[in-house]
Amino acid sequence: MELVDKNKLLIEKLQILHPEYSKHMFNKNEFVKQIVEDQFGGIDMIDRPICTTCQRPCLRSQQGAFCSSCGTTIPHDKIITLNEYYMNQLESVDIEQMLYDTLLKTKGR
């Protein structure tokens, strides 16, 4: 599977599992969105650092990570990836209830 397809699939899953965050992650973050969606390589979304200030995807830098949305620089030892961030979020979620609620919303359309 191409990287751009993996990223699109991840974004689609986020839209179902966590719709508020999926809207938030690229709001005022057009630069990172363009890189993620680039069909000639792009970057792997699941491995993206997440800003500790605004919780949007960041770019890696020599200092650790840089958020193009709010300007925060995150040192190497404070980096949390999207995968780690999202797994932490899911620990407190009842997955079965969430999937049931999502199914009800989908059928209600």
Image (cartoon, helix red, strand yellow):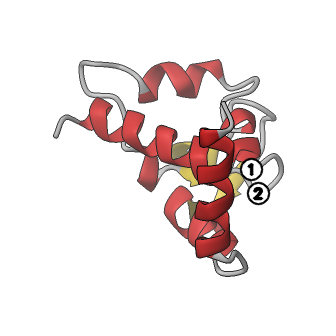
Percent coordinates x, y for residue 88 in the rendering: 64, 75
Picture residue at 77% right of the left edge, 44% below the top:
72
- Please report contact status of discs 1 and 2: CB closer than 8 Å, yes or no: yes
- Farthest-out residue, front: 108
Picture residue at 49% right of the left edge, 38% below the top:
12
Percent coordinates x, y for residue 46 in the rendering: 44, 53
Where 55 falls versus 85 (above or below)?
A: above
For residue 92, the mark is none
Crowding at dot 1, Cα within 10 Å, few <14 / some 14-19 / many 20+, comes out as some
Q: Which residue type carries mark 1? A: Gln
Picture residue at 56% right of the left edge, 53% below the top:
49
Q: Quadrant of residue 29?
A: top right
Q: Nearer the viewer, mark 1 or mark 2?
A: 1
Whether residue 57 is visible, yes or no, is no
Residue at which label 2 appears: 52
Where 5 falls versus 19 (above or below)?
A: above
The answer to whether residue 11 is left or right of residue 28 is left
Q: Secondary structure at mark 1?
A: loop
Where 77 falls versus 45 (above or below)?
A: below
Q: Nearer the viewer, residue 28 or 22?
A: 22
Where 53 falls versus 93 (above or below)?
A: above
Picture residue at 16% right of the left edge, 40% below the top:
1
Q: Quadrant of residue 37?
A: top left
Percent coordinates x, y for residue 32 in the rendering: 55, 28
Percent coordinates x, y for residue 81 in the rendering: 54, 60
Crowding at dot 2, Cα within 10 Å, few <14 / some 14-19 / many 20+, comes out as some
Q: Which residue type carries mark 2? A: Thr
Q: Nearer the viewer, residue 86 or 65?
A: 86
Q: Secondary structure at mark 2?
A: loop
Whether residue 86 is visible, yes or no, is yes
Look at the image and tell me in which quarter the C terminus lies: top right
Residue at which label 1 appears: 55
